[in-house]
Image (tube, grey):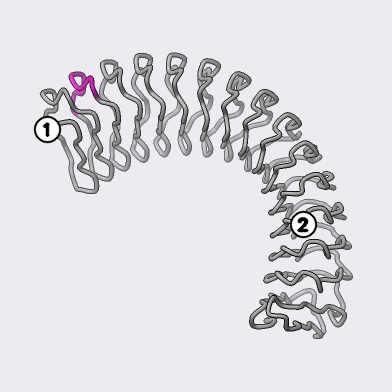
Amino acid sequence: LEVLEMEDNALTSLPDLSQNTALVILSLFSNSLTSLPDLSKNTALVHLSVSNNALTSLPDLSQNTALEKLDVLNNALTSLPDLSRNTALTHLYVGNNSLTSLPDLSKNTALEDLFGLNNALTSLPDLSRNTALVHIWVSGNSLTSLPDLSGLTALKELWASRNSLTSLPDLSKNTALVILSLFNNSLTSPPDLSKNTALEHLSVSNNALTSPPDLSKNTTLRFLQLSRNRLTSLPDLSKNTALEYLWAAGNSLTSLPDLSKNTALVDISVTSNALTSLPDLSQNTALEYLRVDNNALTSLPDLSQNTALTTLTLQNNPLSNLSALTLTGSDGNAIALGETFDGGTTSYTATAASGVTG
């Protein structure tokens, strides 16, 4: 027997597997297991998947030196066994447990994926020897800092949202980084991202930033989330011509930068700021969502070129009327907003196919 797959059953225990020494894949996810049998004789085991059970502990895995994938997501684990002899390990999935720490991973130099989100981790182990790491997911923990990541030059994704981070390590060597997610932390200053020229996704919402990051070198950036900080301005975005999503709601912005070069923009969400005007949006012809409610707008720019626009939110602005505003739908028909606008109570959604509803 090389493959044993018994997923999505109601198993509460397993038989003795010590005679199945050729076993390579053991997949038992989505059962009701509270423990696993002794696996020390299963030295050929490569994949062990026991996610979505009720495990409170794991057996000794020191003899399973061929193990490449360990998936124990969604259990009730409070600790992990020693993994120092599992030097072939490439994928470690331990999220959604009750772990307060991770074991020493310095011998696991082949590790590519570290998935430890939604635990109770207060720190991460030294990762300086894990130079093969591509993905780190540690969101939803109690981390106050991250370890040195400078040697992780293959790192593409760093998810560390919903923690208690007050600062970040130097990321200048992580030039392959594509996704950096840091929302819901306690950061007061933006990271230096000038060397992270492959970055496509940056999320730093729900922090305490008073100044935005310099993004002039991040020309591949597609998604920018800066909402709910303490920003009074946004960075120059003229170099970010690939930008599709600009979210900066819940700050203290009084104006937006020039967006005429950001012709790929699909979604602008800048609600709950102090904006008194909007920039020229005539070049943003791909724009589908414009959310500017809860600001101090007294007028709107010409939106006649924004024929892809499907959602326009304007409530809670001191706009007196919209008689000058005309939208042209993607079907070529005009969508006229000539009603008196009650800025305190009214919002409008413009839908190209069916007109405007309030």
Where is residue 199, by image quadrant?
A: top right
Image quadrant assignment for residue 64: top left
Q: Nearer the viewer, mark 2 or mark 1?
A: 2
Q: Is residue 41 located in the magenta-colored stretch of the structure?
A: yes
Q: Is residue 280 above or below residue 203?
A: below
Is 300 rendered above or below residue 275?
Answer: below
Q: Is residue 60 above or below residue 116?
A: above
For image coordinates 16% across by 22% down, the residue present is 21
> In the displayed image of the protein, which residue is found farthest to the front?
332
Q: Which one is nearer the viewer's eye here, 152 or 312?
A: 152
Q: Position of residue 328 (x, y in %)?
A: 76, 78
What is the crowding at mark 2: few (fewer than 14 residues within 10 Å), some, or many (at least 20)?
Answer: some
* Residue type, mark 2 in image: Thr
Q: On the picture, is 27 further left or further right than 118?
A: left
Q: Is residue 284 toward the left or the right of residue 86 in the image?
A: right
Q: Position of residue 217 (x, y in %)?
A: 77, 36
- Residue type of the residue flagged with mark 1: Pro
Q: Quadrant of the N terminus?
A: top left
Dot 1 crowding, Cα within 10 Å, few <14, some 14–19, many 20+: few
Residue 7 in percent (x, y) is at 24, 45
Q: Which residue is mark 2?
A: 263
Q: Is residue 200 above or below residue 319?
A: above
* Residue shown at the point (85%, 80%) measured from the top left: 321
Q: Considering only order in the chain, which callout, 1 or 2, is on the residue closer to the N terminus?
A: 1
Q: Which segment did they paint magenta?
A: 37-44
Q: Regarding mark 2 in the picture, which secondary structure is present there?
A: loop
Q: Residue drawn 25% across and 24% down?
A: 59
Residue under pointer 1? 15
